[in-house]
Image (spheres, grey):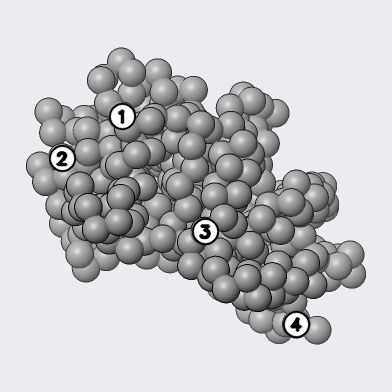
Amino acid sequence: MTIPISRPIIGLEEEEAVLEVLRSGMIAGGAKVTEFEEAFAEFTHSDYAIAVNSGTSALVVGLAASGVGPGDEVIVPSFTFAATANAVAFLGASPVFADIDPDTYAITPETILPLVSERTKGIMPVHLFGHPAPLPELIDFASEKGLELYEDAAQSHGATVKNLMTGSIGKFAAFSFYPTKNMTTGEGGMITTSDPQVNRVARLIRNQGMEKRYVHEVVGLNERMTDISASIGLVQLSHLAEWTEARRNNANYYQENLNPALNPPKVSEDIYHVYHQYTIRPPDRDRTIAALEENGIGYGIYYPIPTHVQEPYVNSAPSLPVTERLADEVLSIPVRPDLEEDERDLIVEVLNGSVSS
């Protein structure tokens, strides 16, 4: 038996939606992109949604539309995919790396406070693995310090904290629709915002700086989504709620049946976790990995090398002890919505066996 850690769910509905677009002759950005933007804005409780061609593009365009540029600093976590910091650095600004809470994997006011300087323009928490960052506390902190809050929501489609929807709180939020995310468009991303200026500038930047054709108001690029991708996204979005509940059911089964020695996620009652990943911290990761491999069970290590020690950012931050420890401990297991019961049972049996004496 081979149990992959993740795979996109693509069915006849997506195939038919793509064929409809192909047969229409309008395969670039058009009516389907607009429809997808409107649906996703409603889903995230945002006034606007701007579709782009990747989650990284959503970060770059969102930051640029928010005025981030040379001389600015943006405080980010190191324990995440490098795109978070790369988007800041790509615009000529400086990512400043903060340590994280070991239970939520998110930056907090306490880890951010020592890093605030006169150059700090904003903070950008990541809702890692589908668990929201502490948005109420971060909102208050940003307001008190006169900073902007940006959300990296690449992994948190539909997650909430104290009934606040991720993607609806910051100056902007960036979502990813990469094939392994909770929903996909093949490749793609979305910027959400309720700021009309961010909305307008982001639309200009993603379209070579144009609102009217051949009239370039700002420097921009082609970071548009196609109607082909948007048609997939509309179908995926219609199934997201049921897929999220399936992920949560799988996670609840793990919570109830895994040996506590595996250190399953800690989730408070005011959190609606969407489980992009189900991440444990076994006492002997190598032993647990060997057991998974022996039984054909997929796994992932997200993320084995923190961003602040990667080549572009070496010496950019002091030691981040929690980040560095977690990079050596974390292990993600299959939690995807199409996981079969017998697969789930085997995963629990193998994991528990890997920590038994």
Q: Which of marks 3 and 2 is nearer the N terminus?
A: 3
Nearer the observer: mark 1 or 3; the answer is: 3
- Position of 241 with respect to 180 (left or right) is right
According to the image, label 2 marks what residue?
Answer: 72
The local secondary structure at tag 2 comes to loop
Q: Residue 2 carries which label?
A: 4
Marks 4/3: CA distance? 40 Å
Q: Name the residue under label 1.
A: 148
Lower sequence index among marks 2 and 4: 4
Q: Position of residue 20 (x, y in %)?
A: 69, 70
- The answer to whether 163 is drawn above or below residue 188 in the figure is above
Residue at left offset 57%, top offset 73%: 25
**Residues at badges 1 and 3 in contact (C-beta under 8 Å)?**
no
Q: How many marks?
A: 4
Circle nearer the viewer, 4 or 1? 1
Which is closer to the viewer, label 4 or label 3? 3
* Secondary structure category for the residue under label 1: strand
Q: Earlier in the sequence, mark 4 or mark 1?
A: 4
Please report contact status of discs 4 and 1: CB closer than 8 Å, yes or no.
no
